[in-house]
Image: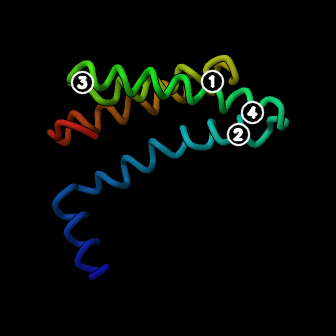
Amino acid sequence: MALWVTIVSDSLYGNISDRIAENAHPIVNIITGIFDSSPDSKLLKLSRQERQQHVKILEKLQLSNVDEPHEIIFELLKFYKPYINSEDWDTLVESKTKLGIIHSDSGETDI
């Protein structure tokens, strides 16, 4: 079964999962770094703020048919901008842009 899934995903999707993982990895590393290096008090504050942001984004998704889902990723990433340096922000934007290109190249309507 695992071999079948691997062969099918590689042949049908042109290693799209590898491209997604490659470009999502820097995003995950940077964001987890924020939480990893934060004291408990900051973590509680970030957690509350994140929940509020997620509610707003979910409402936005429900109110409109999002043609470009990778733009929602950008909305999520903007939350972290004040907590990272400009080099990490550039990495996040670059990775998000590459994910958008992968999405466009795949011909899928949602991520």
Under mark 2, the amino acid is Gly
User: Label 4 neighbourhood size at 10 Å, few (<14), some (14-19), many (20+)?
Assistant: few
Seen from the viewer's position, the closer of residues 68 and 47 is 47
Query: Which residue is at a point 35% across and 23% down the rendered structure image?
Result: 71
* Label 1 or label 4, whichever comes before in sequence order: 4
* Label 3 or label 4, whichever comes before in sequence order: 4
Q: Are marks 3 and 2 in contact (CB under 8 Å)?
A: no
Residue 33: x %, y % from top left: 70, 39
Under mark 3, the amino acid is Val
Relative height, residue 98 to residue 32 (above, below): above
The image's mark for residue 33 is 2
Numbered disc in front, either 3 or 2: 3
Residue under label 3: 66
* Label 1 or label 3, whichever comes before in sequence order: 1
Query: Which residue is at a point 18% across and 64% down the rendered structure image?
Result: 11
Residue under label 1: 49
The image's mark for residue 44 is 4
User: Label 3 neighbourhood size at 10 Å, few (<14), some (14-19), many (20+)?
Assistant: some
Q: Is residue 92 left or right of residue 7?
A: right
Seen from the viewer's position, the closer of residues 90 and 53 is 53
Q: Are marks 3 and 4 in contact (CB under 8 Å)?
A: no
* Label 2 or label 4, whichever comes before in sequence order: 2
Seen from the viewer's position, the closer of residues 103 and 59 is 59
Numbered disc in front, either 2 or 1: 1
The Cα–Cα distance between marks 2 and 4, rounded to whole angstroms, is 16 Å
Under mark 4, the amino acid is Leu
User: Label 1 neighbourhood size at 10 Å, few (<14), some (14-19), many (20+)?
Assistant: few
Residue 110: x %, y % from top left: 23, 38
Q: Are marks 1 and 4 in contact (CB under 8 Å)?
A: no
Q: Secondary structure at mark 1?
A: helix
The colour scheme applied to this rendered structure is: rainbow
